[in-house]
Amino acid sequence: AQTVTQSQPEMSVQEAETVTLSCTYDTSESDYYLFWYKQPPSRQMILVIRQEAYKQQNATENRFSVNFQKAAKSFSLKISDSQLGDAAMYFCAYRSTRGSTLGRLYFGRGTQLTVWP
Amino acid sequence: DSGVTQTPKHLITATGQRVTLRCSPRSGDLSVYWYQQSLDQGLQFLIQYYNGEERAKGNILERFSAQQFPDLHSELNLSSLELGDSALYFCASSVGADRTDTQYFGPGTRLTVL
């Protein structure tokens, strides 16, 4: 089974600064999807950004961007101009594109991000 | 708001009991997924339904079962509850079961087993 590792249980950043959250994964597949989800105190899981493995270009969504290193199996999330509302638990997730595991998301254990004013 | 609804928001029950969690997917979505989030296990995939049929099964206990109805809403049934079943249960939905589909999550149901 695919495994997703987030090695930083907690991170903190000053408002308006930039922070990078790390994620690595283990897979033998060449085609897959990677996601970052955000879980604020409300517990709602909110999609932040998505990356297709076959695309070399890193995905961006406003202040959020990823650094996708396929050979290294690394998928980090950069948050620029951090805002208080970015404080949340962030989960990295992997999704296969074939076989019996096609539909399921594999999640890391999460990184709790604190944003200081 | 993702468009996925889950009821109830909170559920408190006793060991040995049975509960039913309900999920309504986003309008037009045919796939429903169930996940369990606990402190011990993190976020784990339980089961997926697509247009009424079971599509994939994950780490779902035999005491748990699910189904998707013709109107596409889904129910997750948990029986013979144990303390360790206390968790946040999420439902997610996607348009289809295609590789490109993104899953959108509901607000979750917090289950507490006493």
Image: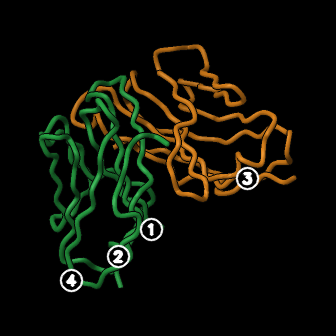
Chain colours: A orange, B green
Disc number at residue B16? 4
Disc number at residue B40? 1
- Looking at the picture, which amino acid does disc 2 mark? Gly
4 and 1 marks on the same chain: yes
Marks 3, 4: nearer the viewer = 4
Of A28 and B39, nearer the camera is: B39
SS for dot 2: helix
Q: Would you name the residue on which mark 3 appears?
A: A11
User: Percent position (x, y) of residue B30?
Assistant: 24, 33
- Looking at the picture, which amino acid does disc 1 mark? Asp
Identify the mark nearer the N-term, 1 or 2.
1
Residue in view at x 45 percent, y 53 percent? B107
Q: Tell me the distance, in whole angstroms, between the alpha carbons under discs 3 and 4.
A: 40 Å
3 and 2 marks on the same chain: no
Q: Tell me the distance, in whole angstroms, between the alpha carbons under discs 2 and 4.
A: 12 Å
Seen in the picture, residue A69 relative to B69 is either above or below; the reply is: above
> In the image, is A103 to the left or to the right of A38?
left
Disc number at residue B84? 2
- Looking at the picture, which amino acid does disc 4 mark? Gly
Residue in view at x 81 percent, y 35 percent? A81
